[in-house]
Image (cartoon, rainbow, N blue to C red):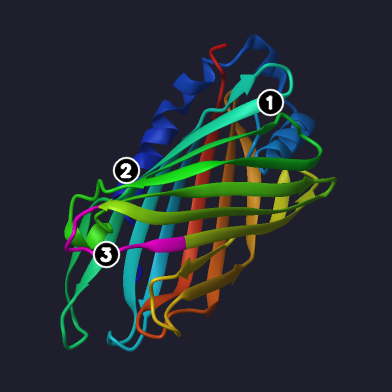
Amino acid sequence: MLIISKAFIILITFILLSVEGLAQQLDDENDNLDINDLEEINRNLENPMTSLWSLVFQENLSLKTGEIVDGFQYANTFFFQPALPLPMGDNLIFIGRPVFPLVTNPVISENGSVVEHKTGLGDIQLLAAIGPNLSDGIVWGAGVTFIFPTASEYTLGQGKWQAGPAALFFYLGRPWTLGVFAQHWSSFAGDENRDDTKRTDIQYVARIQIPGAWSIGMGPTITINWEAEKGNRVTFPIGLGVTKTIRWGNTPIKMRIEPQYSIIKPDNYGTEWNIRIQIAPVINRPF
């Protein structure tokens, strides 16, 4: 049975109740947002180095299976990701992007049955990157990425301080957006009783803009666990989703749903299906 995170429902309700307050922060010039403005905002939000400020709420509901479990088991990760870029002079932009996860994971017994599900804070991530402040053509950025051992339960995190490089390369065209965003983490400290970590995430993006502030495409993330044994290292999902940017009051809001299926996954235990739901209101910069 698919169970949507209660936290997701609560936070979506909070968004709907508070979005009018966010709208009041916008400049008067946004009072006349039309469909052309929304189409441009929809396109700009595909740019990981965009200068737009947004509050990203992302739900990931996963069905996991493998040799160590009976049938399918559900897991859930809800991300809150404020995107608050800072221009640096006329030509550069700095991205400091934290990711706060609320995680629900099954506790699996030795015989493969699920004893219970644990829910709590996961390991917080932080990306710090810099690149040209561009909105068309070739866009790139480079920096560092971190994972902090903040999980509230043993099963919800890795227990390690992790760091590594991050880089992205995108083509922002009309109507296509194509790109790759890679991050790598290696553990350097933390709980000595937990396994060392070495992981690479590669998000690949291919989306086409459609009139009416719509877009269709995919943005799954390939995960490589370098510490795992052969056959359990790679998760390679594909997907197809739809994005629509709407206006609520004076606030543009990006909404997306994207089902994903893993054509490659770990033999022991991994994600086979994932449904990603994203809501991202755009807010005004105070400066």
| Residue 159 horizontal side relative to residue 125, left or right | left
Question: Residue 148 placed where, x, y %?
Answer: 31, 45
Residue at 18% over, 55% down: 153
Above or below — where is 263 with respect to 248? below
- Magenta span dominant secondary structure: loop
**Residue 191, magenta (yes or no):** yes
| Quadrant (top left/top right/bottom left/bottom right) for the C terminus | top right
| Quadrant (top left/top right/bottom left/bottom right) for the N terminus | bottom left
Closer to the camera in the image, 210 or 225 = 225
Mark 3 Cα-neighbour bin, 10 Å: few <14, some 14–19, many ≥20: many
User: Tag 2, which secondary structure?
Assistant: helix
Mark 2 Cα-neighbour bin, 10 Å: few <14, some 14–19, many ≥20: few
The residue labelled by disc 2 is 10
Above or below — where is 222 with respect to 27? below
The residue labelled by disc 3 is 105
Question: Residue 118 placed where, x, y %?
Answer: 19, 61
Closer to the camera in the image, 219 or 15 = 219
Residue 61, label in figure: none
Residue 52 visible in the shown view: no
The residue labelled by disc 1 is 92
- The number of numbered discs placed on residues in the rendered structure image is 3
